[in-house]
Image (tube, grey):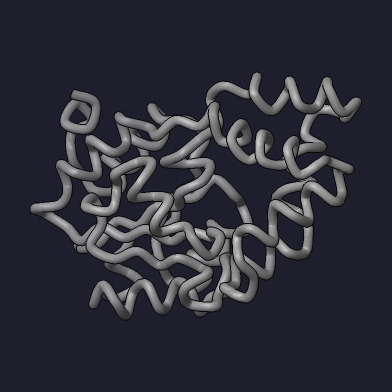
Amino acid sequence: MTIRALLFDLGGVLLRTEDREPRAAWERRLGLQPGALERAVFDNPVSVQSSLGRAETEAVWAEAARRLGLSPQDADRLREDFFAGDRMDQSLMTFIRSQRPLRKIGLITNIWKDGRRWLEDRWHALDAFDVIIASAEVGLMKPDPGIYRLALERLGVHASEAVFVDDMPANVDAARAVGMHALRFLDTAQTLSDLQHTLGEPEASALG
């Protein structure tokens, strides 16, 4: 088995909410249960439409503010605070960059319409990937099999030559269904170990 491409999810894998306090403070202020703020933002129908490229990001925040009963001023503050606790996993990014000379690197992400600009301006990460498949740009969302096939086509590899990492079981299962090797992210150390095992390389090179 020759692995010619590594593909990763963004949110929940490479980029994670490590400090939940900015969101928890809003939940306390609004009298919400833990997790309710994320649901108001991510699970509202406008968010899904933006992830398919059919609505602007501003419309997502406007719908979240409506659901939460926020004033325009508070809506602006929430938008500033919501991602304040997010951190890019530097260990995984270091591993990805170390693989660039050896394999093609792809990103498959369900992300709002301005996601690519946000990924560059906030995290300066675009240069780590040969191909970025952003759902809002292609009109497909994981776990639609079409988004995986599009990524493989743009990378120029067969499914059996690619490994995909995601934290959501449905997305992992969908990647396997199209013939890719797929790993579920649980934590950084486990993922690096699983990748090294799949690649047939010593684990120390990933961690070290």
Q: Is residue 125 above or below residue 90?
A: below
- Between residue 154 and residue 159, name the one nearer to us: 154
| Image coordinates for residue 166, horizontal then vertical, percent | 49, 50
Is residue 64 among the parts visible in the rendering? yes
Tell me which residue sits at (73%, 23%) in the image.
24
Q: Quadrant of the C terminus?
A: top left
- Between residue 136 and residue 131, name the one nearer to us: 136
The answer to whether residue 15 is left or right of residue 35 is left
Tell me which residue sits at (83%, 40%) in the image.
70
Q: Quadrant of the N terminus?
A: bottom left
Tell me which residue sits at (23%, 50%) in the image.
128
Q: Quadrant of residue 98?
A: top left
The answer to whether residue 174 is left or right of residue 156 is right
For the image shown, how many numbered marks are present on the structure? 0
The answer to whether residue 69 is left or right of residue 137 is right
The answer to whether residue 174 is left or right of residue 161 is right
| Image coordinates for residue 63, horizontal then vertical, percent | 78, 56
Q: Quadrant of residue 25?
A: top right
Is residue 143 among the parts visible in the rendering? no
